[in-house]
Image: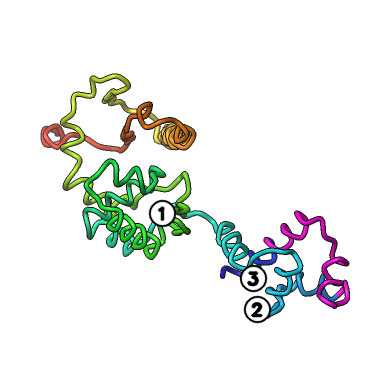
């Protein structure tokens, strides 16, 4: 289970949801109200006491564990070793991209040449890596925040540069809802971060719209890849001509 502080927070929420006072809980536990308050304040509870509180609240211990897990902060990024594990297997990388898009097991097997057994295997691997929490009936909870980003010079971005970048930019960008903008200019260094903040907001808007549209039928959805970039850079051929 997670930290004691998280456990206490969830128990207090469940106590409030059950419209049970500290005095009510104390009576069910056979304890003084002051002792219950002190126990929750300190978080000093053996497993047997937690189980007794669950029974008093008519809460399954497994449900409590899941709710505590759900309070954990979402990850904004992965470690180097986690990313290495993701790119070690092309099908695992595909599964990772699918869960980032919140696809169901049925969508994965229906869209790609992956058997149900393979998908379950890859979901289990992503659970071990820490990207998702696998739940019953092969459902999962994504453990990555909306602000999640791959490591700038990590294994996944290196894989993208080596294997997908040219393929991505070889497109015409002239279809409906497509576009490629190349803008060059010199601006104040102090203003550059504000442009990055705007780009990050666009990325978050895209991610939130993706989440909102998951209730639509597959026939009404189209897969898009939004790539936003900004850096201090000069084309190598031009740089060679500088005095």
Q: Is mark 1 on a helix, strand or loop?
A: loop
Sequence-earlier tag: 1 or 2: 2
Is 201 situated left or right of 226 in this image?
A: right
- The residue identified by callout 3 is 4
The reply to whether the magenta stretch includes residue 29 is: yes
Q: Nearer the viewer, mark 3 or mark 2?
A: 2
Is 57 situated left or right of 67 in this image?
A: right
The reply to whether the magenta stretch includes residue 101 is: no
Sequence-earlier tag: 3 or 2: 3
Q: What element carries label 2?
A: helix
Q: Nearer the viewer, residue 108 or 196?
A: 108
Q: Which of marks 3 and 1 is in front?
A: 3
Q: How many marks do you count on the picture? A: 3
Magenta part of the chain:
10-34
Residue 230 figure quarter: top left
Sequence-earlier tag: 3 or 1: 3
Residue at image location 34% in from the left, 42% down from the top: 107
Residue 187 figure quarter: top left
Q: Position of residue 121 (x, y in %)?
A: 31, 61
**Where is 197 relative to 141, above or below?**
above
Is 187 situated left or right of 39 in this image?
A: left
- The residue identified by callout 2 is 47
Say whether marks 1 and 2 touch (CB < 8 Å).
Answer: no
Q: Position of residue 186 (x, y in %)?
A: 32, 28
- The residue identified by callout 1 is 77
Which quadrant is the N terminus positioned in?
bottom right
- Around disc 2, counting alpha carbons within 10 Å, would you say few (fewer than 14), some (14 to 19), or many (20 or more)? few
- Around disc 3, counting alpha carbons within 10 Å, would you say few (fewer than 14), some (14 to 19), or many (20 or more)? some
Residue at image location 43% in from the left, 32% down from the top: 202
């Amino acid at each position: 289970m997670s930290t004691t502080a998280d456990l206490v927070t969830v128990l207090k929420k469940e106590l409030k949801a059950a419209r049970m006072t500290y005095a009510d809980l104390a009576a069910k536990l056979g304890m003084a109200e002051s002792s219950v308050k002190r126990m929750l304040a300190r978080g000093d509870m053996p497993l047997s006491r937690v189980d007794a509180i669950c029974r008093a609240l008519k809460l399954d211990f497994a449900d409590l564990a899941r709710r505590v897990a759900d309070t954990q902060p979402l990850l904004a990024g992965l470690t180097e070793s986690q990313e290495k594990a993701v790119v070690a297997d092309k099908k695992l990388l595909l599964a990772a991209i699918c869960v980032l898009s919140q696809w169901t097991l049925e969508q994965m097997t229906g869209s790609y040449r992956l058997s149900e057994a393979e998908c379950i295997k890859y979901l289990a691997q992503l659970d071990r890596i820490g990207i998702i929490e696998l739940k019953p009936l092969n459902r999962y909870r994504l453990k990555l925040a909306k602000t999640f980003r791959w490591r700038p010079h990590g294994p996944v971005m290196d894989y993208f540069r080596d294997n997908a970048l040219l393929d991505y930019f070889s497109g015409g960008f002239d279809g409906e809802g497509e576009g490629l903008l190349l803008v060059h200019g010199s601006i104040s260094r102090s203003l550059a971060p504000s442009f990055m903040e705007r780009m990050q907001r666009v990325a978050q808007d895209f991610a939130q719209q993706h989440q909102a549209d998951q209730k639509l039928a597959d026939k009404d959805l189209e897969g898009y890849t939004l790539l936003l970039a900004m850096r201090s850079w000069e084309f190598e051929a031009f740089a060679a001509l500088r005095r």
